[in-house]
C-alpha cells in the first residue's frame, strides 16, 4: 500500500521549479552561494532540509550506457527511445503472470512524491524529487507466491534506438535484482516522474526503480520485465566486475570501492568550488533499512 | 605537398604554438564557471585537462615518425608540445588535489591505495625532469645524456594510457584507442628492419 514512508519535508520545502531553473545564474561566480551552504550543512544531518537538485542537473548528468558512456550522452540520444506503448512483463513466482500495460499499471497505482538522496557508486550524489508508486503495490497486484525470495528486473534493449549497445561496455540487456524484503520495503519505488513531470527518457522513462539506500546502478531504468524468483539473480555490474560491484551495493562509507574511496561524495550542482561531503551509511536511510542487514558482514556482502 | 608544409612550418614561430596551446585553459575555466562543462564541472575539467595533456604527449610522439616516414619536419615544435603537455598535466593534478579531493589525508591515501592514481603520479614524476631540462642550457650541459633522459617520454605516455584505462568503469573504448595510438607511435620508432 502507498504512503508507507513519509517525507519529513512538505510541499512548501520543495524549491519552486522556476527558482531552480535560475539557480546557475544566481550562483554565477559566487563561491559560497546560499544553496551550497544549505547542501553542505543539511545533508550531513537528518533528512530535514534536503534541497533537490535542479531539473536541468537531474536530466543532463546521467549514466545510461545504452546511449553512450558520457554523462551528456543520454540527454543527447535518449529521445530515440520509444516509450509508447510500453508493457512490463511480470512473471516467475506470481499468481497473475503476464504483460501489464503501462497505462493499466498507472491506473491502479497511487502516485506520490518522494524526495530522495541519490548516490552513485562514482562518489557523486544528487537529491531528486521523484514521483512514483511503491514497488510493493505493483508486486502485490501480480500476487507474489510464498516461494519467492528475490525480484529480478530487466531494462529494454533496443539496438536500433540505443547507440551505446553496439559496444560491450556491459552485457546487454541491463539486469538488476533485489532480495524480496528489499523490494517490498516502503522506501522502494518505481519512479514515473520528476518534479511532477513525466520522467524524461534519459532518466529511465517510462518507469524505473529507485532504491535510495543503494548505489545508483541498482535503480534500474526503463523496466520491461520483473521476475519473482527463488535464486539470487545476476546483476549487470556484478557480472562485469564482481570484485568491484556486489549484489547488495548498499551505500557504505566504510567499504571502499577497490579503486576509490566511498567515504565522501561530491554533490552535483555545487559548481567548480563545491566541497565534498561525508557519505552517510545507507545513504542516510540507516534508520529505515539497517535491520534488513542485521547479522550480515557488509564488508563482504558488498 | 610535404615541401609546402615544411616551408610553412619553418615560417611559423614557436611562440604561436604556445599561445594556441594555452588558449583552452581560460576557455575551459570560463565554461566550468558558466555551466558549459555540465552539472559536475570539477570532474569534467579534470578530464578535459587530462585529455589535452595526453593529446599533447601523443602529438610530441608523432614528430619523429612523421619526419622519418613522411619527411615532414616539425622538430622545432616538439619542445613546445612537451612543455604544454607538462603544463596541462600539472593543471590536471592541481584540479584533482585542490578541487576534487581537497582533503589532505585522503589525497595521500588515494596516491598509495588506488593503483590508477599511483600510476598517474608516476607518469607525472617522469615528466618533471623532462620539463626541467627542456631548455638549451640543459641540452648543452647534459649532452648525450639528455637524449637518453628524454626517452622517459615513452614511459610517461604508457603510464598515462594505463591511468586512463584504469579509471573508467567497465570496458570502454576511448581509453583503449588512446593506448593503441601510443603503442603504435612507439612501435614506429623501432629501427627499420633491413
Image: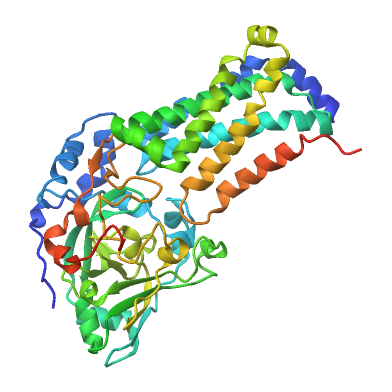
Q: The N terminus of chain B appears in which quarter of the rendering? A: top right
What residue is drawn where x is 46% and y is 42%? B115
Q: Nearer the viewer, residue B42 or A45?
A: A45
Q: Nearer the viewer, residue B103 or B30?
A: B103
Q: Which of the colour schemes (rainbow, by chain, secondary structure, one colour) is used? A: rainbow
Where residue A262 appears, x then y in whole percent?
Answer: 30, 48
What residue is drawn where x is 57% and y is 53%? B173
Q: Residue furthest bottom?
A: A95
Where residue A207 appears, x then y in whole percent?
Answer: 31, 70
Q: Residue furthest right?
A: B194
Question: Is A28 located above or below residue B170 in the figure?
Answer: above
| Residue B53 position by quadrant | top right
Give the number of marks: 0
Whether residue B36 is visible:
no
Would residue B120 appear left or right of A134 to someone viewing this image? right
Where residue B171 appears, x then y in whole percent?
Answer: 52, 56
Q: The C terminus of chain B appears in which quarter of the rendering? A: top right
| Residue A265 position by quadrant | top left
Would residue A227 appear left or right of A134 to someone viewing this image? right
Where residue B153 appears, x then y in whole percent?
Answer: 63, 28
What residue is drawn where x is 76% and y is 34%? B189
Whether residue A288 is visible:
yes
Q: Nearer the viewer, residue A83 or A100?
A: A100
Amino acid at each position: 500500500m502507498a504512503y508507507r514512508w513519509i517525507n519529513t519535508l512538505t510541499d512548501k520545502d520543495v524549491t519552486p521549479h522556476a527558482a531552480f531553473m535560475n539557480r546557475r545564474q544566481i550562483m554565477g561566480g559566487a563561491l559560497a552561494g546560499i544553496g551550497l551552504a544549505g547542501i553542505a550543512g543539511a545533508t550531513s544531518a537528518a533528512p530535514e532540509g534536503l534541497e533537490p537538485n535542479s531539473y536541468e542537473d537531474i536530466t543532463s548528468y546521467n549514466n545510461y550506457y545504452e546511449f553512450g558512456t558520457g554523462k551528456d550522452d543520454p540527454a543527447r540520444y535518449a529521445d530515440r527511445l520509444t516509450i509508447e506503448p510500453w508493457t512490463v512483463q511480470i512473471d516467475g513466482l506470481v499468481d497473475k503472470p503476464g504483460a501489464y500495460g503501462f497505462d493499466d499499471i498507472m491506473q491502479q497505482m497511487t502516485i506520490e512524491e518522494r524526495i530522495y538522496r541519490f548516490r552513485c557508486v562514482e562518489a557523486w550524489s544528487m537529491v531528486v524529487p521523484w514521483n512514483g508508486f511503491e514497488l510493493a503495490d505493483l508486486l502485490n497486484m501480480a500476487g507474489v507466491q510464498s516461494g519467492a525470495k528475490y525480484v529480478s528486473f530487466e531494462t529494454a534493449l533496443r539496438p536500433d534506438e540505443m547507440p551505446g549497445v553496439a559496444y560491450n561496455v556491459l552485457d546487454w540487456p541491463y539486469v538488476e535484482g533485489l532480495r524480496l524484503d528489499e523490494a517490498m520495503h516502503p522506501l522502494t519505488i518505481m519512479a514515473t516522474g520528476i518534479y511532477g513531470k513525466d520522467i524524461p527518457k534519459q532518466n529511465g522513462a517510462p518507469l524505473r526503480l529507485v532504491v535510495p539506500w543503494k548505489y545508483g546502478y541498482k535503480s534500474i531504468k526503463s523496466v520491461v520485465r520483473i521476475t519473482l524468483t527463488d535464486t539470487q539473480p545476476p546483476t549487470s555490474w556484478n557480472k562485469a566486475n564482481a570484485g568491484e560491484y556486489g549484489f547488495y551495493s548498499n551505500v557504505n562509507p566504510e567499504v571502499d570501492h577497490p579503486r576509490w574511496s566511498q567515504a565522501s561524495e561530491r554533490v552535483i550542482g555545487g559548481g567548480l568550488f563545491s566541497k565534498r561531503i561525508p557519505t552517510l551509511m545507507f545513504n542516510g536511510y540507516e534508520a529505515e533499512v539497517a535491520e534488513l542487514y542485521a547479522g550480515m558482514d557488509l564488508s563482504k556482502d558488498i | 605537398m610535404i615541401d609546402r608544409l615544411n616551408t610553412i612550418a619553418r615560417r611559423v614561430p614557436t611562440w604561436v604554438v604556445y599561445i594556441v596551446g594555452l588558449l583552452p585553459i581560460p576557455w575551459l575555466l570560463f565554461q566550468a564557471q558558466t555551466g558549459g562543462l555540465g552539472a559536475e564541472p570539477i570532474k569534467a575539467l579534470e578530464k578535459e585537462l587530462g585529455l589535452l595533456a595526453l593529446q599533447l604527449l601523443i602529438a610530441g610522439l608523432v614528430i619523429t615518425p612523421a619526419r622519418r616516414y613522411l619527411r615532414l619536419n616539425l622538430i622545432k615544435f616538439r619542445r613546445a608540445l612537451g612543455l604544454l603537455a607538462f603544463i596541462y598535466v600539472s593543471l590536471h593534478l592541481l584540479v584533482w588535489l585542490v578541487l576534487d579531493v581537497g582533503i589532505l589525508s585522503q589525497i595521500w591515501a588515494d596516491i598509495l591505495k588506488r593503483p590508477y592514481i599511483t600510476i598517474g603520479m608516476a607518469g607525472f614524476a617522469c615528466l618533471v625532469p623532462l620539463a626541467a631540462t627542456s631548455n638549451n642550457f640543459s641540452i648543452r650541459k647534459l649532452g648525450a645524456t639528455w637524449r637518453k633522459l628524454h626517452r622517459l617520454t615513452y614511459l610517461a605516455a604508457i603510464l598515462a594510457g594505463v591511468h586512463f584505462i584504469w579509471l573508467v568503469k567497465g570496458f570502454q573504448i576511448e581509453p583503449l584507442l588512446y593506448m593503441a595510438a601510443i603503442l603504435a607511435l612507439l612501435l614506429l620508432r623501432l629501427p627499420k628492419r633491413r
